[in-house]
Amino acid sequence: MNPSPARAPDRYAVAGHPVEHSQSPFIHAAFAAQTGQALVYERLLCPLDGFAATVRAFAASGAKGCNVTVPFKFEAAALAADLSERAQLAGAANTLRFDARGWQGDNTDGAGLVNDIQRNAHRPLAGQRVLLLGAGGASAGVLGSLIAARPARLRVVNRSADKALALAARHQAWADAHGVQLSAGALDDCGGTHDLLINGTSASLAGAGVPVPASQGRVLAEGGLALDMMYGPAAQGFLDWAGEQAGPGGVLRDGLGMLVEQAAEAFLFWRGLRPDTAPVLAALRQRLAGA
Ligand code: ATR
């Protein structure tokens, strides 16, 4: 009797526009090697008007799922047959699993952020004062998970205050259910000093630097934690500025830890097991430093 042929590895990808700089193939290859899972992970460049068609073709070819990145996370949520509660709150999906019922959508960005703060930086969120800068896609993706970690107070501020107010309003019932005092306003109304400061704006990409006006004075307590969801040079200006407020006891984090943690949550969603993120984060830092 012939031995049965080896099963082809399961296929996944990151779908976006652009995708060439995505670190997700490196991260998921490292998770697969570490856990002994037979999978391959590709880049899926989608035309701006062709996300659905490209991902449908990928699924029809036998692929098992994909991550979704800019600018398609909202479209992915709209097209999913089922959405996790956190993806519904975000109004966006960054992870899709394909099965006979259609696309199952999840959003792992918020869990990635929370895990990076609590597990990697060893800082609690429960009972803390948190300030979230920005009310675009990045902030919307994490607000539900931040609330679920039960800070005492969470304030969302944005250049256009109405967007922050709308985002907070959408999360009000969720905040009430978790006993979190949620508020929102403009960037020039940060509401005093906080224990954790999270930058979800793209101000640095726009060349605008730190989004908090100087008029706000101190917004981060001494010894506090500041995290920019970006990484590399795009995060540096904000973290340098926040470091002056936090002082020597402060913790400064770019978005690389969050990136690896959200990937680990996606891996869990697809494969049912959680990889060890620490060695992968270290390897990714080394890789980017050498790039
Ligand atoms: P993303 O998906 O990366 O979050 P987005 O949805 O376009 O992108 O959101 C960008 C965020 O950065 C928004 O909160 C935006 O503020 P507005 O809603 O007022 O546009 C914020 N942002 C962009 N440039 C900024 C700047 N120069 N100063 C302050 N905030 C800025």
Image (spheres, rainbow, N blue to C red):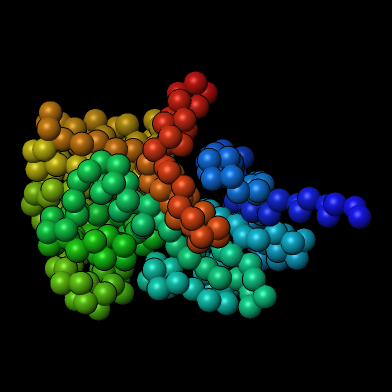
Query: Is residue 160 in view from this perspective?
Result: no
Q: Quadrant of residue 130?
A: bottom left
Left or right relative to 185: residue 209: right
Observer-nearest of 277 and 98: 277
Q: Is residue 287 left or right of residue 174?
A: right
In the rendered image, residue 85, in percent from the top left (x then y), is placed at 40, 73
Q: Is residue 156 left or right of residue 204?
A: left
* Front residue of this view, candidates 215 and 202: 202
Q: Residue at x 20, y 36 (%)?
A: 251
The answer to which of 234 and 62 lies nearer the viewer is 62
Q: Residue furthest top?
A: 290
Measuring 41% from the left and 55% from the top, which residue is drawn there?
A: 109
Q: Position of residue 252 (x, y in %)?
A: 24, 36
Image-based side of 140 in relation to 35, left or right: left
Q: Is residue 289 above or below residue 74?
A: above
Quadrant occupied by the N terminus: bottom right
Can residue 278 be seen by looking at this rendering?
yes
Up/down of 228 relative to 61, above or below: above
Residue name at image x 19 percent, y 54 percent: 125
x, y percentage for residue 155?
18, 60
Q: Residue at x 63, y 74 (%)?
A: 102
* x and y, in percent, of residue 152 in the image: 12, 62
Q: How many marks?
A: 0
